[in-house]
Amino acid sequence: MSGIAPHTRRGRLTAAAAGVLVLAGVLLLVVGLRAQRQAPQPPASAAIPIVSSSSPVSPGTSGNSSGAPASQAPAAKAPAKPVRGPLLSRSVPVALEIPQLKVRSDLLQLGLNPDQTVQVPPLEKDSRAGWYKYSPTPGQLGPSVILGHVDSAKYGPGIFFKLGALRPGDTLSVIRSDRTAAVFRVDRVASYPKDSFPTLEVYGNTDSAQLRLITCGGKFDLSSHNYESNIVAFATLVSSHPA
Amino acid sequence: MKKSLLLSVPALALGAAALAMPGAASAAEGSSYQAQLNALNHSSASGNIMISLNGSQATITENVSGLADKFGGNPYPHVQHIHIGAKGECPTTAADTNGDGVISTTEGAPSYGAIGTTLTTSGDSSAAAGLTLTVAPSGASFKYSRTINLDSKTLASLKGGTAVVVVHGLDPATLSKQAQGEKSDLVPSLPLAATSPALCGTLVASQMSAMPGGSADTGGGSTSGVEDQALLGFGGALLVAGLGAGAVAMRRRTAAES
């Protein structure tokens, strides 16, 4: 067929239209690709503690005595393992600061849902973390639990979006209502599938003042609209100071 | 759900709960106990157990693995109990008074005591059901989940720190020749392996006043996978259209020149 010579008006328009479409397409793709955000997932190496500090008390070892935890148990039994490290008195936490992640949050108080799962903070634009109120207050002996969303469907990244980027040795502070700041050092960061969540490893008794920061991670299951795993950062109290 | 820059997506409130609400009232009133279950008698099993107590009602969650798997071709029944009223300890090898290499249930009694409650899969959970194989969980690993009422003696022992969970039933192949030929001290028609302890752990008060059931629902999924799919799709479509138009223009140019 007779072609459209490039120097005709129609030829130039077609070429120009093609150029615009390509440019627009590339622009949108670049914008879209650069807007991708992935929550950091902890590598396997982050699950290895730099010091052997946070192993839970094992109360029933054959060959040992019962090993009830130090000050909390109603039983008058001496603990098999002595308490390690500093302890603080009970004081409800009000804020959390993780300088390494540029995270700062007021803390809500969370309870239990009727199905015995832990309550999570409401999904809102101002994403805040929450302290599980049936766990010890941060600084007391035992595993104090703080939870935060990794993201929400509507608002994007949540307060604990970067939790998976914490590494052993990082420090964070919890401000308590008694105006002390409890400083914790991260021991390890691990990812656990929710369908085989190691309950006692995360929530079991400890022989020091411990913290558990929990969020979601791993793959997102489209059919159930849930993440498959929980990321847990384990940390030990190292010091405190006036807030 | 994928967040899109172009289209608004209806919010999917996952696990959202009122903040700082009183929550399940039972959590604040109850208490929680836990035990790591450790191997006895050269078993290679392990496990843990948690008890959420509300008055005399105990919600029990237990996970064990590595137990003997089969008994005469069928799943191996592992009777399990809360033993009470003694030292609240798991026995050491010093308890093996007859020196056959196996701490029998009787030999362990000075450490952990008599049966207070039987952790049956259904029906009677008193000491009377202590040796009923048909209501014992079975197999190499199991998850036991049940809510039962504890009697006053078990409750007292639990709160006093002398309650010990014992799971019974050993793999005969792990016993000495002598022990393999012995009869059970509890049920003479059964071999010693069948009723001797495999796992043991003292129940201690949890440092949590209420133990959560497990994982946490802390994510709505907007940052997972590919975000802004509509934007990327539209961009891709434009690119393809542009390249297609460009190809048409190029082909016509070539055709015109030839």
Image (tube, coloured by chain):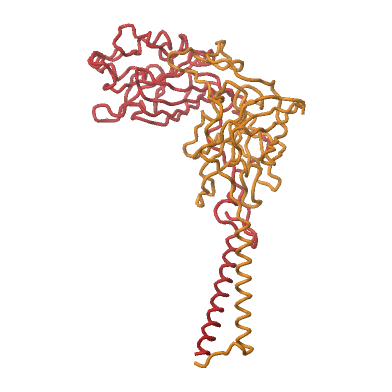
Task: State the image coordinates of residue B181 (x, y, percent, origin top left).
Answer: 22, 15
Residue nearest the viewer, comparing B230 with A134: B230
Apparent colour of chain B: red
Residue B25, given in percent of the width and then of the height, sits at 62, 30
> Which chain is assigned orange?
A
User: Looking at this view, is A37 or A11 the one in front?
Assistant: A11
Instruction: Tell me which corner region of the image, top left, top right, bottom left or bottom right, holds residue B119.
Output: top left
Where is residue B107? Give x, y as percent: 36, 9
Relative placement, left or right, of B54 versus B97 is: right
The front one of B99 and B219 is B99
The percent position of residue B112, horizontal first and vertical second, equals: 43, 12
Is residue B16 shown to the viewer in this render?
Answer: no
Where is A45 relative to B106, above or below? below
Residue extending farthest bottom: A2
Residue B237, relative to residue A81: is it above or below?
Answer: below
Q: Residue at x 46, y 10 (%)?
A: B85
Q: For the image shown, how many numbered marks are present on the structure? A: 0
Q: Is residue B120 above or below residue B100?
A: below
Residue B106 lies in quadrant:
top left
